[in-house]
Amino acid sequence: MTDPTPHTVTAADLTLEEKAALTSGADFWTTKSIDRINVPSIMVTDGPHGLRKQTGSGDHLGLEDSVPATCFPPAVALGSSWDPELIERVGAAIGTEAVIEDVAVVLGPGINIKRSPLCGRNFEYFSEDPIVSGVLGAASVRGIQSRGVGTSLKHFAVNNQEFDRMRASSDIDARPLREIYLRGFEHVVRREQPWTVMCSYNRINGVYASEDPWLLTTVLRDEWGFEGLVVSDWGAVNERVAALIAGLDLEMPASGGRTDAQLVAAVGDGTLDEAVLDTAANRNLALIQRSQQRPAADSPLDVDAHHALAREAAARSIVLLKNDGDLLPLADERIAVIGAFAAEPRYQGAGSSLINPTRLDSALDEIRALAAGEVSYAPGFAVPGSKNNPDQTAEQLRDDAAAAATAADIAVVFLGLPAVEESEGFDREHINLPAEQLALLDAVIDANSNVVVVLSNGGVVALPFNDRVPAIVEAWLLGQAGGGGIADVLFGAVNPSGKLTETIPVRLEDNPSYGNFPGEFGHVRYGEGILVGYRWYDARNIDVVYPFGHGLSYTSFDYGQVTAETVDSGIRVTVDVTNTGARDGREVVQVYTGLAQSAVQRAPRELKAFASVALAAGETRTIELHIDREDLAYWDIRVDRWVVEGGEYTIDVAASSRDIRSSTTVTVDGDAVDVPLTMESSIGDLLRNPVSGPIMRGAMSGMFGDQSHNDAESAQEPDTDDTLAKILESFPIGRIVGFPNVPVTYEQIEQLIAAANSATQQ
Ligand code: BGC
C-alpha cells in the first residue's frame, strides 16, 4: 500500500491544474497521484460479483485478462436467494480480495430494475422489484465496505437496456421514476452510504445522467444525504464542465488531460466557479484518504474458503421451478447427463464484470462425485462460439443423447443461452432457447419421460416445454462453483430455497415494456409507468409460466394466520411458518400490500418485506417482518413528495406473488397533503375541504337541490342529483361564475378559497 496521505490535504493545498487533474482518472483503473504533496493514486476495479483487476493494458469491456479472483454468482443468481445475510458474506469476501489486491473501490453492485427480459445486462441486476433490489444491493454494499473497501452503486439511473445505452433518453414520468427506478438507490444510499455512486451513460428525460444537477445533487445529496463521491460510468461524461457543475466528481477513465484543461479554462473565463471544483477535488481527496485507512491484508487469498463460499452461494441461488412426483432429489438412479453446459459451464456474463476465476467446477464432474449410480454423458448440442464442440452433426448429437437417455433411469438435461447471446453492450432480440436445444429436449423426452431440465441463463427464457417435463431447475449463471452447487441441489445435499426475483412470462409480448423497448431515435418511453414486472401481470390478470417469488423446496411449509399492526415506523407483520416435511429447509416468506380504494393508480399487490428463514423439519417459528412506513408511500405529483395514503391496506403473506397463504388488513393513518385551493380547483375539491365544503353544500342545495339527497324519485330513472354531482366534481370553480342560476361572484369564491387555505395553514 502507498504511504498514507496526510489527513490535512484539501483542495486549498492544490493548484488549479492539480484540482482539475484530480477529478479525472490517470488511466483505465487508477486516479492521478500528486507526488508533490504525497497524494497517492488509488485503484478501482469491477465488480460486481468478484474482482476484475487488470494489470496490463486495461479495458472496460472484459476483453483483456485480469488476475485470478473468485467468481461468485452474478446478481441474477444471488438475488434469487432473497438473503441479505448471504449476500453480505459474499460482499465481505469480495472486499477481502480487494484488500489483498490493493483495490480501493469495487465497481458495484448494480441495482438497475429488470424492466425487460431482453436487457443484455440483466444477469448483473437483482430484480424487477425495487425493494428486493434495494435490500439486496444494500447487503452487498455493507459486506464489501465492511472490509474498508469502497463500493460504486451503479448505474444511476434508469439504465435498463444496453441498446444505444450511451445516448438513449429514458423518457419517464415522475411516479415510476421515484417509485420503481430510484427507490432501490434511495434505500441503499440512505442506509449504507456507498463510498461512490456511478452515474449511468443514458439520458433521463433528455438530460445526460452525468450532467443532471437534479439527479446528482438535488435528489442524491440534498434529498437522500449522500456524502460520497459521484464517478462517471466509463466514458459517460458528455460535457465535463456541465458535469462537474451538476455534481459529477470524478470522470473515468482518463481524458488524456483534454477535459481537465476545459475545467481550467472555464474557471479562467468565469463560467465555472472554482469553489465547485474545490468541492469535487475535496471529495476525491476524502475518498483517497478513506481508502488509505483500511488495514493491510494479513494473509493471502484463501482460494479454498472462497470457493466453498461460492459453492454455498450458488446452491442457495438455484430456483426449483417444478418437481412433479418428487423426481428430485436424485438417489442411486442411473443418470444420463445431457447437454454441453454440463461439461462446459456457462457461469457468468460477458462484459466489464467478466472474472478470471480461480477455479471452475463443471456440473458433470460434481454429479459424478456425488452420484451413487452410473453416470453417462452426451453433449447433445454444439455451443456457438465454443472451441470444444464435438465433431458431429446436430442429428448425431441428438441421437447419441436419446440413446443415453434410453439407457438411463433419469435424464438430466442442461440447456441454456450461449454466451454470445448475453452480454453487456447489446440486448437480446427474443427470449427463446436455441431451436437446436429444444429439438434435443424433444428427442430426450421421447426416449425417457423422467427428465430434469437444468437451465443456465442470465436472463429469463421462455419455457415452451414446461408441461412436458416433470422437473425444471433454474440454475442461472452461478459463478465458478456453480457445478458443485447444482450437484448439491440435484442430490439434496442442499435443499433448494431460491425464488424468482423476476416473472417468467408465457411470451415476450406479454411483458409490460413490449412495444416500448428499446425505443427509437434516441428515446425509450417507459409507457407502462409503475406497472413493471409482476405489478403489470397482476394488474392485467395475465397468465405467466412462473410468477415472481416462486420457487419450490424438497420440503413443504405451512403458514398460520397473519397478524398486522401499525407501529410508528410502519407495520409489524407476524406469522407462524412450519416446516411440515421431513427435511430441513428454508422458506422465503414474502409480504405484499394492496390498497383497493386509492387516489392513485396502484398494482394489486406490491412486495414490501421478505425474509429467508431456515426451518428444521417439523419446526414452527414465528416470523416477524417489518414494513417501513416510507415503503408504503407513493410519489405525489401535486406536491412533489412522498405521501403515505391513509386507508385500509391488505396485507398478504405469501410463498410467491401468486401463492397467497394468509391475509389480513390494517388501517394506516395517511400523511396530510395540503394542496392549496385555487380558482382552478374543482367543485369536488372545494366540497371535500373542511372549511369550504359545508358552505358550498349549503349554497349548492339552494341552486341545484340538496346534493346529499340520494333517493331516486323512481328506481327506473337516473338519479339526477347524483349525475349532476358527478359532472360538477371536476368542474373548475372559477369557471362557473356567471353561469345562469349561479348567484355567486368571483370575489366571493376568492374569499372562500382564501379562508379555506388560511385555515389549512394554521
Ligand atoms: C460499465 C460499468 C463498469 C465500467 C468499468 C462500463 O462499461 O457500464 O458497469 O463498471 O465499464 O469497467
Image: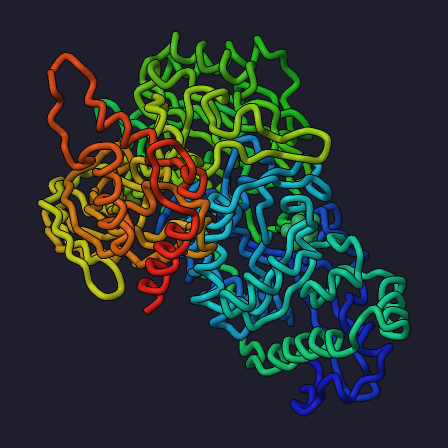
Q: Nearer the viewer, residue 274 or 10?
A: 274
Instruction: Give above or below for 714 relative to 557.
Output: above
Q: Position of residue 699 (x, y in %)?
A: 25, 43
Q: Position of residue 381 (x, y in %)?
A: 56, 19
Quadrant for the N terminus in the image: bottom right
Q: How is the image coloured?
A: rainbow
- Residue name at image x 42 percent, y 16 percent: 464
Left or right relative to 262: residue 78: left
**Total numbered circles:** 0
Q: Nearer the viewer, residue 107 or 563?
A: 563
Instruction: Name which quarter of the figure residue 569 lies in.
Output: bottom left
- Residue name at image x 55 percent, y 35 percent: 526
Q: Position of residue 551 (x, y in %)?
A: 31, 36
Left or right relative to 490: residue 420: right
Left or right relative to 752: residue 659: left
Q: Nearer the viewer, residue 675 or 651?
A: 675
Q: Position of residue 146 (x, y in %)?
A: 47, 72
Left or right relative to 117: residue 206: right
- Residue name at image x 62 percent, y 31 percent: 518
Instruction: Give above or below for 491 relative to 69.
Output: above
Residue 23 shows in the view: yes
Instruction: Give above or below for 59 relative to 505.
Output: below
Quadrant for the C terminus in the image: bottom left
Residue 368 shows in the view: no
